[in-house]
Image (cartoon, rainbow, N blue to C red):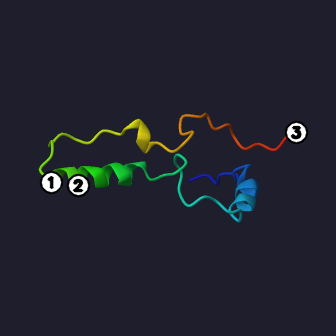
Amino acid sequence: MPKRPPHPDNDLIDEQTGLPTSSQGGSSGGNIAPNVGERDELKQAMGGDPEPTQVNKSDKPAKGDMPTPPNRAPS
């Protein structure tokens, strides 16, 4: 197998690995799925409708529909 040249971005990638990152991606708040799941479990335990529980507007965090522009430093 022929030897491949190193990727041109290896130095950049190595520099970035030391920077702090978020623990998880996703929308602000990040608790929509657990909250809906808990509500569904309670509903089923109480003998409620067996259909899946839907996400309501109230489940979204405040300003959850606002666009999130990228965090870029001014040039």
Residue 2 image position (x, y, % from top left): 61, 52
Q: CA distance from mark 1 to mark 3?
A: 57 Å
Residue bearing the label numbered 3: 75
Q: Which mark is residue 55?
A: none
Residue 56, picture quadrant: top left
Q: Between disc 1 and disc 3, whose residue precedes? A: 1
Please report the residue visible at 81 percent of the width from the left and 44 percent of the height from the top: 73
Q: Quadrant of residue 63?
A: top right
Residue drawn where x is 42% and y is 44% of the image: 59
Compute the Cα span from label 2 to label 1. 6 Å
Of badges 1 and 3, nearer the viewer stands 1
Q: Quadrant of residue 67?
A: top right
Assign a secondary structure to mark 3: loop
Of the two numbered discs 3 and 2 in the rendering, the one whose residue sits closer to the viewer: 2
Residue lying at 42% horizontally and 36% vertically, measured from the top left: 57
Given residues 6 and 72, the one toward you in this image is 72
Q: Secondary structure at mark 2?
A: helix
- The reply to whether the C-beta atoms of the residues labelled 2 and 1 are less than 8 Å apart is yes
Residue at which label 2 appears: 42
Residue 46, labelled with which disc?
A: 1
Measure how far apart labels 3 and 2 are at the Cα level: 51 Å
Verify CB contact (< 8 Å) between mark 1 and mark 3. no
